[in-house]
């Protein structure tokens, strides 16, 4: 009898709360997909360097999955609370007919078990197929070989998913048992007649709270835009924004209707007064949860738009900032001879011409570099730079600067397919890393001259260039002063840099590295003092692999957390509206009795749901606009972020997911208020 009753109740719950079960299924699917990355066939076709980044990503995913499990668990418990609220009268009837509380608890446990098995089964089935699509996406992201692709099921991910959701549903069972043991019969039977918390009733208190909310949010926006996301005050800024968000929704409970009443033509048109009072009544009791949902949507938008934008920016920057197939660096030491690195490699038996189509050497020299700090800082502040930006992007206290001759600089530019530069005697050109160029250009406009080794130089026609001198050689980074050959050669050598463009088909550098390993063996390290003509070797492919790893980690984490938060937020709002429709079905029946047309009632229901779902999203979009601008400003010195395309992609995803939940909620709520579904 219990099994038949439990099965009937679960079947009825699936029809009444389709949003809830769809959310559970999606949660299982999402949890499995992102925990099965290590078993996807694409992972088996990666190079060793890329596999190391994938292992780091998998380890990070395991930690994030704990957080995701907690979020999904809270969602399920929260949704179950609404499910139980709908059934309080039913449980009261069970008690009235003589059923013991222990029997009711066992019935609820059976129902929860059936719900869990149903969600796990469907979610895992969808997740297994979705993980194959994720394999293709991951393979493209890591540029992996997919020729031997096959269908893969991850037993480890299945076990982790089952274990996680088993724990969640055990918590739900315990929650239901405690609820049944503590409830009173009179409370269950009179559940639908309970008055709601009136919230903030005084309109002037609401107006005051609204003013405080606007003040707190405005202060938080301006503060974080001024200091950036890496300031020590970020925690206080976040706290101020959270307080402002809570105050905003708390003030709406007494402010929304009063504001609408100032426009009688709108307020009394159709069923607008009924719609606004319904929304206002709901906000009374759930303003805190709406605040939390708004903040979750804010994190979702920033994670998706910011994550997608940053991953693309880092990928593009990695290719632009590594123009050579490989770079060799030799540190000039006292007593050690200078050399032609390419010639020495060939003399030692490394067939460089077999792997490289062209190369050029740059002799890096060193000299005390003096920048006029006081005048520069004053000028930069006048141009709108903050002291923090100046401190982060320009080091005026540096004692040494790299010096490079014009001919060798032009040889490196020709190797990178760039036009040559021109300088007159007494002129300089500053070659700087990404992000510093705007500050150095502002410095040139404000001060103009640089002092190098006691000699002052004037800017050339093109004085500041944002350009890498090597691929992955840290010794070649920083500010490099390019002078004419005669002027550069007066400064002492500090290092030798050989840039190489590899032949087609050998761009990964593996063949070159193997040839070097064959010549410069461990025995030579132990027996020869000057055993090879370079100290550091960096290849573009290794740098790009590292960039792919960073990009993938950012992208996966952003999509994972963003999707979980988006589904959670939309599901909670939808469940609240379904519960609201069930509680107020009598009011909609009364509207029909008073003469309201079915079409008008339906529009009122849809408008109520739309306003309720739109309020937290609207404020979250405003938060996100400020947050993404802060991210763009904070990273502009390191990478050029273009948030536009990723923001459009995020908007499309929000429209699909959020719009889908809106439609599902409208259809479900309409069916509830009509009362036509079988019971």
Image (cartoon, rainbow, N blue to C red):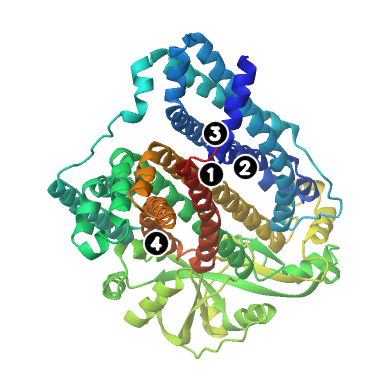
Q: Where is residue 486 in the image (x, y as percent from the top left)?
A: 55, 84
Q: Position of residue 458 (x, y in %)?
A: 41, 85
Label 4 Cα neighbours within 10 Å, binned few <14 / some 14-19 / many ≥20: some
Locate residue 304 relative to residue 259 in the image: left or right: right
Which image quarter is the N terminus in? top right
Measured Cα–Cα span from mark 1 to mark 2: 8 Å
Q: Read off the residue under disc 3.
A: 69
The answer to whether mark 1 and mark 4 are in CB contact below 8 A is no
Which corner quadrant of the image does residue 154 belong to? Answer: top right
Measured Cα–Cα span from mark 1 to mark 4: 21 Å
Question: Closer to the N terminus: mark 3 or mark 4?
Answer: 3
Q: Read off the residue under disc 1.
A: 564
Q: Read off the residue under disc 4.
A: 625
Measured Cα–Cα span from mark 3 to mark 1: 10 Å
Measured Cα–Cα span from mark 3 to mark 2: 11 Å
Question: Closer to the N terminus: mark 2 or mark 4?
Answer: 2
Instruction: Please say whether residue 165 is visible from this viewpoint.
Output: no
Task: Pick the residue in front: 132 or 605.
Answer: 605
Question: Closer to the N terminus: mark 1 or mark 2?
Answer: 2
Question: Closer to the N terminus: mark 3 or mark 1?
Answer: 3
The answer to whether residue 384 is above or below residue 7 is below
> Which of the labelled discs sits on residue 545, or is there none?
none
Instruction: Please say whether residue 652 is visible from this viewpoint.
Output: yes
Q: Read off the residue under disc 2.
A: 30
Task: Pick the residue in front: 481 or 88.
Answer: 88
């Amino acid at each position: 009898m219990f099994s038949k009753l439990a099965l009937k109740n679960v079947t009825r719950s699936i029809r009444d709360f389709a949003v809830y079960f769809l959310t559970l299924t999606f949660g299982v699917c999402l949890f499995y997909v992102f925990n099965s990355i290590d078993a996807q066939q694409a992972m088996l076709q990666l190079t060793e360097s890329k596999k190391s980044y994938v292992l780091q990503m998998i380890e990070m995913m395991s930690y994030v999955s704990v957080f995701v499990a907690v979020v999904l668990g809270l969602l399920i418990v929260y949704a179950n609370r609404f499910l139980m609220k709908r059934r309080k009268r039913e449980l009261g009837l069970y008690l009235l007919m003589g059923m013991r509380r222990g029997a009711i608890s066992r019935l609820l446990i059976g129902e929860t078990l059936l719900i869990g098995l149903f969600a796990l089964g469907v979610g895992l089935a969808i997740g297994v197929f979705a993980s194959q699509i994720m394999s293709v996406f991951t393979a493209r992201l890591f540029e992996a070989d997919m020729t031997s692709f096959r269908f893969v099921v991850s037993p480890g991910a299945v076990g982790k998913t089952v274990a996680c959701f088993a724990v969640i549903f055990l918590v739900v069972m315990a929650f239901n048992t405690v609820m049944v043991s503590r409830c009173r019969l009179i409370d269950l039977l009179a559940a639908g007649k309970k008055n709601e918390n009136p919230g903030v009733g005084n309109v002037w208190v609401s107006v005051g709270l609204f003013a405080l909310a606007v003040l707190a949010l405005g202060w938080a926006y301006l503060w974080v835009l001024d200091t950036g996301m890496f300031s020590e005050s970020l925690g206080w800024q976040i706290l101020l924004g959270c307080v402002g968000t809570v105050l905003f929704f708390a003030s709406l409970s007494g402010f929304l209707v009063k504001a609408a009443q100032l426009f009688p033509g709108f307020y009394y048109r159709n069923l607008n007064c009924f719609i606004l009072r319904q929304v206002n009544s709901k906000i009374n009791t759930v303003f805190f949860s709406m605040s939390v949902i708004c903040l979750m949507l804010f994190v979702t938008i920033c994670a998706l738009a910011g994550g997608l934008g940053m991953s693309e920016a880092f990928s593009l920057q990695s290719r632009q900032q590594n123009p050579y197939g490989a770079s060799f660096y030799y540190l000039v030491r006292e007593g050690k001879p200078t050399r032609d690195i390419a010639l020495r490699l060939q003399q030692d038996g490394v067939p460089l011409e077999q792997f490289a189509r062209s190369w050029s050497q740059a002799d890096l020299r060193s000299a005390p570099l003096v920048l006029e700090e006081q005048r520069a800082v004053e000028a930069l502040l006048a141009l709108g730079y903050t002291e923090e930006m100046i401190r982060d992007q320009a080091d005026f206290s540096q004692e040494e600067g790299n010096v490079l001759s014009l001919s060798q600089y032009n040889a490196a530019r020709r190797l990178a397919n760039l036009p040559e530069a021109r300088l007159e005697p007494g002129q300089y050109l500053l070659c700087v890393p990404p992000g510093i160029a705007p500050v150095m250009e502002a410095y040139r406009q404000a001060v103009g001259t640089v002092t190098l080794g006691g000699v002052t130089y004037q800017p050339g026609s093109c004085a500041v260039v944002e350009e890498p001198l090597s691929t992955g050689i840290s010794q070649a980074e920083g500010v490099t002063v390019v002078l004419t050959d005669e002027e550069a050669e007066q400064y002492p050598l500090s290092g030798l840099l050989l840039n190489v463009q590899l032949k087609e088909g050998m761009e990964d550098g593996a063949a070159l590295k193997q040839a070097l390993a064959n010549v410069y063996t461990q025995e030579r390290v132990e027996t020869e003092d000057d055993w090879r003509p370079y100290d550091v070797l960096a290849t573009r492919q290794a740098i790009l692999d590292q960039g792919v790893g960073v990009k993938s980690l950012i992208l996966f984490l952003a999509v994972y957390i963003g999707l979980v938060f988006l589904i959670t937020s939309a599901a909670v709002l939808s469940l609240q509206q379904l519960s609201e429709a069930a509680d107020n079905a009598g009011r909609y029946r009364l509207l029909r009795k008073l003469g309201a047309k079915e079409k008008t009632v339906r529009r009122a229901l849809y408008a109520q749901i739309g306003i309720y779902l739109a309020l937290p999203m609207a404020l979250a979009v405003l938060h996100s606009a400020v947050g993404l601008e802060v991210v763009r400003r904070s990273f502009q010195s390191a990478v050029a972020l273009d948030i536009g395309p990723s923001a459009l992609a995020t908007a499309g995803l929000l429209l699909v997911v959020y719009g889908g939940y809106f439609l599902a909620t409208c259809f479900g709520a309409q069916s509830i208020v009509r009362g036509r579904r079988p019971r």
